[in-house]
Image (spheres, rainbow, N blue to C red):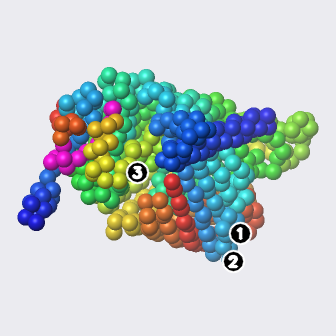
Amino acid sequence: MSLCLVVTVFQSVAAVEIAANPDVPMKQLTRNELQAIFTMRLRAWPNGLPVRVFVLPDNAPLHSEFVKEKLSIFPYVLRNYWDRMVFSGTGQFPIELSSVAEMRDRLADTPGSVGYLPAELIDQRVRALKVINP
Amino acid sequence: MMRKQTMFKTIVALCFGLSWASHCQAEGDSKQSKQSAGLWDTVSSWKLPDTVQIHGFASQSYIHTSGNEFFGHSTNMGSLDFTEMGLNGSWRPIPQLQTSMQVVYRRAGKTDNQNVRLDFGFLDYNIINNGDTLFGVRGGRVFNPYGLYNDTRDMPFTRPSIFLPQSIYFDVNRNFSLSGDGVQIYAEHRTNFGNFSLQINGIYPRTDDPELNLNILGNSSGYLTGDLSWMGRLSYETDNGKIKLSVTSAEINSHYKPLSVAANFCRDLPGTLCAGQFQFSPILFSARYIDGNWGLTGEYALRPTSFQNFGPSLPNISLTGESYYIQGHYRFAPQWEALLRYDVIYDNRDDRSGQKTAALTGYPAYTHFAKDITFGLRYDVTPWWMLRAEYHLINGVSWAPATENQDNTDQHWNMFAFSTSFRF
């Protein structure tokens, strides 16, 4: 019971982190790279591996937190970017996953994948990517 | 005609190709889970690559007008003649190369031929693609980079309202506006103070809109054909997406060829056109500001058009139309958005009241301008189902379809529209 309480409190204060498959040849991202990845413009990593972007549904609290904090925009604005790319034929949608647990498993299993996780769920199977200002 | 048939066959082939492929994947997945043997093992090895995406949309609108028909018989009981359905597919076999297409079926009263058409279909090759820079080329049927909304104007969810501001995005000429056949070169660059992007098209425009033909040619028999045309758009956007500015410039060329019989007496018979050229060379300035749940958008266009060598029935003429709108949106609850817009068009900026033109043409002055105040409401029931309602208070009939309103028009009219749209 008390453990549950601790976990709940911990989760509510934990920050969202950018997470990637360990194959991704980056330890940190510039702000431009982060924007290019999640607006679906970056198609390959520097070593040629295709970029696979994972997200949670628009109404998931973690998605909202990630979009507002890391990308500094609103989820509906990001959705509009994606729609404009797909329905003008110039890009593709990210892959939408249903839960944080699925996000962690798919990030661990999929080469070239990138997404986000609560900081405390990042283990050795995935890699946290820091954002630096160029 | 030949070209149309070939195009149609290509569309059908591609549609069947894609639907067959997705069918294979669905079958493969279900059988895999049941672990049955035999033929299904072969089928299940036929998995659709995860670089293939298929999406679509469908929308049905109801339109009621107090006067003047818009997309069907919208007066009296109202019209259900506005239907849009689209299938969008893309495949990225290698990161640098993407092929995309969108096939659309559309009904819009007499302004549309109500057929299945390829809205875009092209190969897109990224020559440079990193976090800072994107540069590449697209070839095939490419969308026209025009203003803020043209690129995805056929997709109801990406529009700000059921009808785009008609002063700039004429729905009655949507094929002509939407895309053309040719090449697009594109570039994007991210800097510390924002993102710059540029698209330049060299295309042959589509000239199959019934309304375009009527507006340019009247009732003359013959063909309007697109000639090599140019369009370019330069945009700037802050990296938080709050401010977006762009300027679009274009030179769209087409020529008219009368039926051979008519060509012989076009100089003698009033109302008959000789072989001539039509040019449209707009310049458009766009600005958008979004702050959290609200935003302001405005666009201003100068639209020079010229008619040359059509013979005595249509003397050489050049005139400049003017269009602008200002629009605000506010998301007052998570799934709700309200919109307010004021939209104005003048057919000739040297005669905004239309009275000089009326004296020349005999058509009433109010047919040469339109001012539209729009109130709109959007409700996203779910991420894939959207409802919209809007009310327009309109003075003037400049953009009311000529194909549907030949003689009697009303200067002051209003329009109510309701739409239900789905996507997958």
Residue B320 image point, x, y percent:
58, 46
Residue holding disc 3: A80
* Relative horizontal placement of residue A53, taking residue A26 as reference (left or right): right
Where, by quadrant of the figure, is residue B77 drawn? Answer: bottom right
Mark 1, secondary structure of its residue: loop
Closer to the camera: disc 1 or disc 3? 3
Q: Verify CB contact (< 8 Å) between mark 2 and mark 1.
A: yes
Query: What residue lies at 55% left-to-right and 66% top-to-bottom?
Result: B419
Q: Is residue B25 magenta?
A: no
| Number of on-image labels | 3
Seen in the picture, residue B77 relative to B385 is either above or below; the reply is: below
Closer to the camera: disc 2 or disc 3? 3
Give the letter of the chain under mark 2: B
Q: In this view of the protein, which residue sits in the foreground, B125 or B44?
A: B44
Label 3: few (<14), some (14–19) or many (≥20) C-alpha neighbours in 10 Å = some
Q: In this view of the protein, which residue sits in the foreground, B9 or A80?
A: B9
Three-letter code, disc 3: Asn
* Disc 1 and disc 3 on one polypeptide chain: no
Q: In this view of the protein, which residue sits in the foreground, B370 or B270?
A: B370
Residue holding disc 1: B73
Is there any visible trace of residue A47 in the rendered image?
A: yes
Q: Compute the Cα span from label 2 to label 1.
A: 8 Å
Is there any visible trace of residue B242 in the rendered image?
A: no
Which portion, as a residue range, is magenta? A111-122
Query: What residue lies at 61% left-to-right and 69% top-to-bottom?
Result: B62
Three-letter code, disc 2: Asn
Residue holding disc 2: B76
Residue B388 image point, x, y percent:
50, 67
Q: Compute the Cα span from label 2 to label 3.
A: 37 Å
Query: What residue lies at 82% left-to-right and 47% top-to-bottom?
Result: B220
Give the letter of the chain under mark 3: A
* Relative horizontal placement of residue B344, taking residue A32 as reference (left or right): right
